[in-house]
Amino acid sequence: MKTNKQITAKWQFISINDGKRRIVDDKMLNNFKKEYGTGTLEFKNDLSFSSLGSKNNNGGTYSLKDSTVIMQYSDLSESIKFNYSIVENKYLLLTNNEGKPHTWLYKKSN
């Protein structure tokens, strides 16, 4: 089981990208689409998270297992699973485990 210290931070949303991604490149960094809005995702030490954005404000709890983060939103009955990786200690990549793969890119916020 991974420690939450790596993921514990406030992350600024940058883009959603097709496919499973493991590296951050210029295309991902410049893939802004207004329909996705803006926002932050904060993972806290107490295993809670908050998701604040132009389209929604929500939160819940999370757990980590291997390279998977399991997020239980307070208003959803089912949890959501993402593969995650931290790149260069400043980018967070979340890739959905079901359906057509997409990778969400976040940058660590100060």
Image (cartoon, helix red, strand yellow):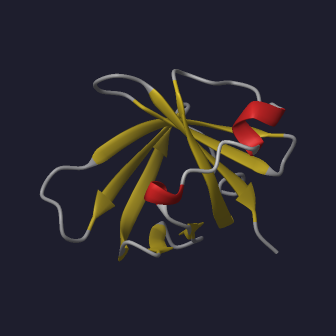
Please report the residue visible at 55 percent of the width from the left and 70 percent of the height from the top. Answer: 39
Q: Is residue 84 left or right of residue 81?
A: right
**Location of residue 19 in the rendering, given as x and y in whole percent from the top left corner:** 51, 21
Up-down: is 33 above or below 28? below
Q: Residue 102 placed where, x, y %?
A: 46, 31
Residue at 76% from the left image edge and 27% from the top image edge: 23
Q: Position of residue 30 (x, y in %)?
A: 74, 44
Left or right, 67 with reference to 108 = left
Residue 24: image x %, image y %? 77, 33
- When the figure is inspected, residue 107 is found, relative to residue 25, above or below; the finding is below
Is 55 displayed left or right of 110 in the figure?
left
Q: In the image as oriented, which residue stretches furthest toward the front?
A: 34
Residue lying furthest right: 88
Q: Is residue 24 visible?
A: no
State the quadrant of the C terminus: bottom right
Which residue occupies the extreme left position in the image? 77
Q: Can residue 75 be seen?
A: yes
Residue at the image position 37 percent from the left and 73 percent from the top: 59
Image label count = 0
Image quadrant in which the N terminus is located = top right
User: Could you say which is closer to the camera, residue 34 or residue 104?
Assistant: 34
